[in-house]
Image (tube, grey):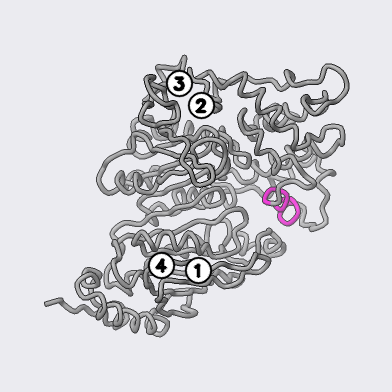
């Protein structure tokens, strides 16, 4: 006989285990309970806007301001959808949603992150978590829309975006989960890429008890300095028309980079597997006379050099933010193609630094304006601290991943954070709690020439719940629906090494080992 329990606020529910025993009866009861959550769930500085059961396997996301027409999400299990409004400050208006399976909950909670300036609930990511059996949550980070105009004159909303919305969503969502199932999640995960990676770092550094394990891809954690680099990449090609590199010439630079560095890992495969050992000067692409489609002019060569070099303080020479890596050239349209800088970076200057929506990026002078930029810089936007001792002390696991061909977040910024973790925690603690995986040829959070499709969440689950640290992650590449390459991703600083005797596009013929010439660096 299934034991009945009275849950928080007198909401009568059956334990989560019962859902699997009498699915139809329990699902019907759970649907009714979902309808009553709005009245029964009492939260602090938050309220339930609506709570309803979603059945039939399909969900139509609401239209978001400025977004394309939403598409129906199909193949979903039945779930309880709870919409929340969170108000931790008088100027806060944070929208969040919690999705809870009516049957087959795996006992886990997963919160998903947002890219760029956030501004909407991440419905596809919620659906992915739900299909895996998770109770899941997402937030718009306190505003609607994709730019940073919300921040002008609203410092509390900027704090909500910076860190508060994610934390408040975690706290209130787990209250809802506990209320609904009659038991708290047994383990909690955060999963985000790019801006979601920045959110993950905020949680890990500020609120180490919110999540037990974190999956952070291409983490844009150094938001202010990264925005400076994004701006300077655009200025390198757009300030002077002679410096503009047309997209038709990206393959020219890319082929030259491959010629210089593809073989450094001992295998010519069209990928730069060891970019940190690559010393490529685009001057080799310079035209001998005049201009031509197959070469770069001298001003174009200089612009490419700036994109690779990153940004240094003009007065001190200190590196502000690293540049893009050789092998990323086919993805330069966003950072350098114009006619404007990448909006995620430019918006920081328009709405937060200079508070002028009509600000012209051509007027920016690094030597003159850098101090103004950093008057607004703080851990609210840039969670750069390597002190995650509280997170790892309670068994927290951090799995990082990124593509070497990333055009938005310079990969060396992630390397720098990993190195700072080692300095702060020691190599043994980092080995026990942190893994960083780089994917050669992968662009920002996916895509690109290299293997870029992989499941990093399952290895993280096994690591956190079973103590099995991931030794490698198999990634695949698909063209028009056909698998054409697989490759193991290796924990940094290791790289994939070809064993010989088989196909170079088959992961089975590779092992993880030390980079060539750096055998002592491998863990």
Q: Earlier in the sequence, mark 1 or mark 3?
A: 1
Image quadrant in which the N terminus is located = bottom left
State left or right for residue 501 relative to residue 70.
left
Q: Which residue is mark 1?
A: 96
Mark 3 or 4 closer to N-term? 4
The Cα–Cα distance between marks 2 and 1, rounded to whole angstroms, is 40 Å
Q: Check disc 4: other Cα within 10 Å, few if <14, some if 14-19, many if 20+.
A: some
Q: Tag 1: Cα neighbours inside 10 Å, few (<14), some, or many (≥20)? A: many
Image coordinates of residue 499 in percent, x first then y, are: 37, 21
* Residue that mark 2 sits on: 273
For the point 39% across and 63% down, which residue is it? 130
Element type at mark 4: loop
Is 348 magenta? The answer is yes
Q: Nearer the viewer, residue 87 or 114?
A: 114
Q: How many marks?
A: 4
The residue tagged 4 is 76
Query: Which comes before the other along the chain, label 4 or label 2?
Result: 4
Disc 2 or 1, which lies upstream in sequence?
Answer: 1
């Amino acid at each position: 006989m299934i034991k009945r329990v009275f849950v928080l606020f007198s909401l009568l529910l059956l334990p989560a285990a019962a859902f699997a025993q009498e699915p139809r009866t329990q699902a019907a009861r759970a649907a009714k309970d979902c309808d009553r959550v709005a009245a029964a769930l009492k939260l602090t500085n938050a309220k339930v806007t609506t709570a309803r059961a979603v059945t039939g396997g399909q969900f139509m996301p609401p239209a978001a301001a400025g977004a394309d027409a939403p598409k129906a999400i199909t193949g979903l299990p039945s779930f309880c959808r709870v919409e929340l409004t969170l108000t931790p400050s008088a100027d806060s208006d944070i929208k969040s949603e919690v999705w809870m399976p009516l049957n087959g909950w795996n006992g886990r909670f997963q919160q998903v992150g947002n890219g760029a300036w956030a501004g909407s609930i991440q419905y596809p990511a919620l659906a992915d978590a739900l299909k895996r059996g998770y109770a899941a949550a997402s937030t718009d980070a306190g505003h609607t829309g994709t730019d940073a105009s919300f921040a002008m004159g609203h410092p509390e909303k900027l704090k909500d975006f910076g860190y508060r919305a994610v934390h408040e969503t975690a706290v209130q969502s787990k209250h809802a989960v506990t209320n609904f199932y009659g038991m708290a999640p047994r383990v909690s995960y955060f999963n985000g890429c790019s801006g979601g990676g920045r959110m993950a770092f905020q949680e890990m550094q500020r609120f180490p008890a919110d999540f037990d394990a974190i999956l952070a891809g291409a983490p844009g954690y150094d938001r202010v300095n990264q925005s400076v680099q994004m701006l300077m990449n655009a200025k390198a090609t757009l300030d002077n028309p002679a410096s503009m590199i047309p997209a038709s010439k990206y393959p020219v630079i890319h082929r030259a980079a491959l010629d210089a560095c593809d073989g450094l890992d001992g295998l010519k495969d069209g990928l730069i597997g060891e970019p940190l050992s690559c010393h490529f000067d685009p001057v080799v692409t310079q035209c001998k006379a005049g201009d031509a489609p197959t070469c770069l002019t001298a001003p174009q060569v200089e612009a490419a050099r700036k994109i690779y070099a990153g940004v240094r303080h003009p007065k001190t020479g200190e590196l502000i933010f690293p540049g893009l890596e050789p092998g990323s050239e086919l993805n330069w349209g966003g950072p350098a193609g114009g006619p404007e800088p990448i909006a995620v970076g430019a918006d920081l200057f328009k709405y937060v630094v200079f508070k002028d929506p009509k600000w012209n990026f051509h007027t920016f002078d690094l030597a003159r304006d850098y101090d103004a930029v950093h008057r607004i810089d703080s851990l609210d936007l840039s969670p750069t601290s390597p002190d995650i001792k509280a997170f790892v002390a309670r068994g927290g696991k951090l799995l990082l991943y990124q593509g070497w061909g990333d055009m938005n977040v310079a990969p060396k910024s992630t390397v720098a954070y990993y190195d700072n973790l080692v300095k702060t925690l020691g190599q043994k603690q980092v080995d026990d709690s942190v893994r960083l995986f780089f994917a050669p040829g992968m662009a920002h959070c996916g895509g690109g020439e290299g293997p870029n499709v992989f499941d990093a969440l399952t290895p993280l689950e096994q690591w956190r719940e079973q103590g099995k640290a991931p030794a490698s992650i198999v990634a695949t590449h698909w063209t028009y629906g056909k698998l054409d390459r697989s490759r193991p991703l290796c924990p940094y600083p290791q790289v994939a090494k070809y064993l010989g005797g088989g196909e170079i596009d088959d992961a089975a013929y590779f092992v993880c080992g030390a980079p060539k010439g750096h055998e002592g660096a491998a863990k």
